[in-house]
Amino acid sequence: MAAKIGVIGAGKIGEALVEGVLAKGLAQSGELILSVRSEQHRSALEARRGIRTFCDNRIVVAEADTIILAVKPKDVVDVLDGIADLLGPSKLLISTAAGVPLELLEAKVPAGTPVVRTMPNMAVAIGQGMTALAPGRHVPPERLAWATEIFRACGRAIVVAEEHMDAVTGLSGSGPAYVYIIIESLADGGVKLGLPRDVATELAAQTVLGAAANVLATGEHPAKLKDQVTTPAGVTIDGILELEEGRLRVTLIKAVVKAAERARALLHKAR
Ligand SMILES: NC(=O)c1ccc[n+]([C@@H]2O[C@H](COP(=O)([O-])OP(=O)(O)OC[C@H]3O[C@@H](n4cnc5c(N)ncnc54)[C@H](OP(=O)(O)O)[C@@H]3O)[C@@H](O)[C@H]2O)c1
């Protein structure tokens, strides 16, 4: 069976995508082909997944129509140099490498090769990822739809213009770390009031999950949902007053902006 999807660099993100693609039936294991760097990882991955896995990226590109490039950003150029002659308009190259721009990717592959740059987050590993995709200059709508479908198999996915990728990095890329701190802090509040740590953490995490699910399910502005649970002269408004005094809003806004600025700075340094 010819390979439909190849993953070069089947590490944490690459294997998570494989898992999603199989779970959603976008491809069968016989239609997948993977590569990694080390023989140790290759044999372990092949034994674990039952998917043909190589230490030779050229086999992957020769066989697959869609190639997901999920190596570390520092390895992207070397890997592309090794496979570029096998790419072209009949293939689709999808990069997950953080901060590697379309300009560089397109310069490394034959003219006309469809290239999509993506920014997933680690929640793709549990099917709850948030991925932004930015198409290059030669991506027909149906191929962009296919790329989007692959990431939707692991959570949500949206298409953005590449100029927004730094903002995406600062928000949904780095965001899980901010939310872990928020969950930990909410749980600390519960512990301060005498709740066992595990109980407090479960309460905090499910509260964040429920609120997030409500925003996505209703499509309502978060401020409206906040107002719905804030009774006049009730309990919650006292908690909100503390948050405002502690400048939670401005702190989170600045965290997203700072991380995006850092992403942009790293990109300029790499050029
Ligand atoms: N992790 C995240 O939260 C996250 C979020 C957004 C974007 N990304 C991006 O996704 C990419 C992958 O990240 P990751 O966290 O999944 O990294 P990872 O777990 O380290 O996976 C990278 C994989 O690439 C393989 N590799 C290295 N050099 C190779 C080569 N020359 N040919 C073929 N395979 C090679 C490695 O194989 P060996 O194991 O054999 O060395 C490893 O399995 C990165 O570019 C990162 O910027 C990651």
Image: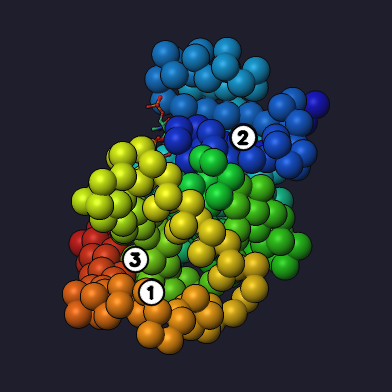
Q: Count neighbours of disc 2 (C-alpha within 10 A) and say few if under 14, some if 14 to 19, many if 20 or more.
A: many
Q: Nearer the viewer, residue 128 or 80?
A: 128
> On the rendered image, what quadrant is the C terminus found in?
bottom left
Q: Is residue 71 left or right of residue 221?
A: left
Q: Earlier in the sequence, mark 1 or mark 2?
A: 2
Q: Nearer the viewer, residue 101 or 156?
A: 156
Determine the CA span between mark 1 and mark 2: 41 Å
Q: Nearer the viewer, residue 3 or 147?
A: 147
Q: Is residue 41 left or right of residue 110?
A: left
**Residue furthest to the bottom:** 232
Determine the CA span between mark 1 and mark 3: 29 Å
Q: Residue at x 71, y 27 (%)?
A: 29
**Is disc 1 placed on a helix, strand or loop?**
helix
Does the closest atom of ligand 1 sit within 8 Å of the Cβ of label 3?
A: no
Q: Residue at x 49, y 18 (%)?
A: 42
**Is disc 2 placed on a helix, strand or loop?**
helix
Which is in the foreground here, disc 1 or disc 2? 1
Check the image and report above or below for 240 versus 144.
Answer: below
Residue 257 lies, in percent from the top left, at 28, 74
Check the image and report above or below for 167 versus 1.
Answer: below
Assess whether mark 3 and mark 1 are in contact (beta carbons under 8 angstroms).
no
Marking on residue 236: 1
User: What residue is shown with label 3?
Assistant: 170
Check the image and report above or below for 160 versus 30.
Answer: below
Residue type, mark 1 in image: Thr
Residue type, mark 3 in image: Gly
> On the rendered image, what quadrant is the N terminus found in?
top right
User: What residue is shown with label 2?
Assistant: 19
